[in-house]
Amino acid sequence: MQSITRRLGVLLLTFPAFFGAEALAAGMGLDLEDLDDYAFVASRNTSEIAVISTSDDLLIGSLDLEHIPSQLVISKNQRKLAATHKMEEQLSIIDLEKGIVTVVIDLGFRPAALQIDDRAGVVAVADPSSGALAMISLETEKQLFSIDKLDDLTDLMFDRDGEHLLVSHGHRGKISVVDTKSGELRRPITLSTSEGIVELVRTPGGKTGLALHGESGLVSALDLVEKVQIRSTRLSGPVYRGFPTANSQYFLLPIGTGETVSMVSSWTHRESERLPGIENIVGMNFAMFDSVAFAFGGEESAANVISLLGNQRSTLITLPGHPETGLTVELGTKVYVALSNTNQVAIIDAISKNIAGVIDDVGDEPWAITAAGGLGYCH
C-alpha cells in the first residue's frame, strides 16, 4: 500500500497509509469531498501523482504508486483514480477516500489506450499493437472481461450511456461495438468509406461522434444513439485529433500540424468556420463558457487564445515552458498547462488572457493533467 504525502516548503511529511485522505483533510483543513476542486498531474519520470488545489493554486500533496503511470483517469462517482503502467503491463486503482492503492491488476498486455465512463463505473484499457482489450469495474475493482485480437485497433470511445464501447480500426471503415457488461460484439457501425480511422471523438453530451480518417481529411459523423453514420465531410488537410466544446455545439479539428483549425458543427456536421491555430499543436482547451479556445503549440512554447464568438481575434501568450496537456478549472476562468521541461504547471487567467503564475515541483517531466469530469487530456 502506498500513502499520500504533503510538501510544506522543503519539509516532506509522510502519513501512514491508514491515515488516508480523510486524515489529511482533517489535519490540514482541506475539504476533499468535492473532487472537482482538485487536479492530478502525472509525470514521465516519477511514480508520484501530484495533487493540486484548484481553488488556491497550491500543490497540496501526492499519490504514491509503485510504478510510473502511463495514463490516468478519475472517477467522481466511485472516488477512485485508475492509472496504467505500460512497461509493467498493469493497471492500479487508488481509493481517493483512503489515499492508497487498493488493487493492481495484471493485464497481460502493454496498455496504451485508456478511457473511462463514470456513469457506468467502468474503465476500458487496450493495447493497439496487439488488439487486446480489457474492461475493468471500478466498483468491484476486478476485470469484467477481455478480448483478444481486435485487429488494427486505433482508439476507444464509450457511447452516451456507457452501455457500449466503440473500437476503431486503422485498416477499415468499420467501428466495432462492444457490450460493456458482457463483452459481446454487437452489430458494428459500417461507414460509407473503406478508409481506416485514426481517432474517435464525441460530444460531452454523448449524442454525436466523429470518426477521423487522418491524412485524407475525411471526417465521418456518427449518431451514437442509433449507432449509425449520418454524414461525412472532407476537410482541406489531414485531421488526426478532435476537441469538442463543453456545450456539445462544436468540434475543433486542427488541420495538419495545427496552424489552422476547422470548427465543425455537431448539428450540421459541416465546417462552419476556419480559425487560426498554432504550429505543432499539442492540445486545446476551452474556457469562459466556450467563448474562447486555448491552442497550445510545442514549437513556440506558446498558447494561441482564439475567440469563438465570430470575430476570429486571437492573442498569443508565451508560456514559461514546453506545454504538454491542459485542464480547464474554476468554472472556466482558469486553464492549467503542464510544462514538461520546467516541472511546473502554468496558470492562465482566462479572463485577462495572461499568465497568472506557476505551480512548482509538480513532478519530473509532468505531461498529463486531469480532474474528475475535467476538460483535460483524454489520451
Image (tube, rainbow, N blue to C red):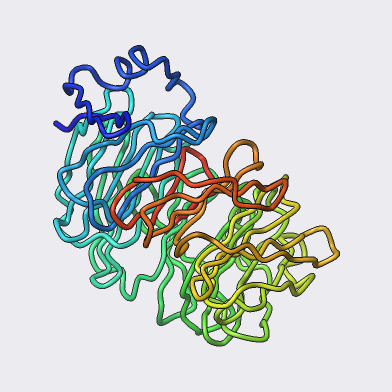
Taking the view exactly as shown, the residue that stands out farthest to the front is: 10
Seen at 62% across and 70% down, the residue is 253
Q: Nearer the viewer, residue 151 or 68?
A: 68
The spot of residue 210 in percent (x, y) is 59, 66
Q: Is residue 3 left or right of residue 62?
A: left
Whole-percent x, y for residue 114 in the image: 36, 55
Quarter of image, res 262? bottom right
Counting from the top left corner in percent of width and height, residue 26 is at 36, 12
For the point 15% across and 44% down, the residue is 66
Going by the image, does 369 lie left or right of 269? left
Q: Quadrant of the C terminus?
A: bottom left
- Give the position of the N terminus as an image quadrant: top left
Q: Residue furthest right?
A: 311
Q: Residue furthest top?
A: 26
Foreground residue among 2 and 333: 333
**Residue 97 picture location, percent across and down:** 32, 23
Q: Is residue 223 left or right of residue 69?
A: right
Residue found at x 80% / y 66%: 313
Answer with left or right where residue 162 lies relative to residue 302. Answer: left
Q: Count the labels in the image.
A: 0
In percent of the image, x 52 and y 80: which residue is there? 214
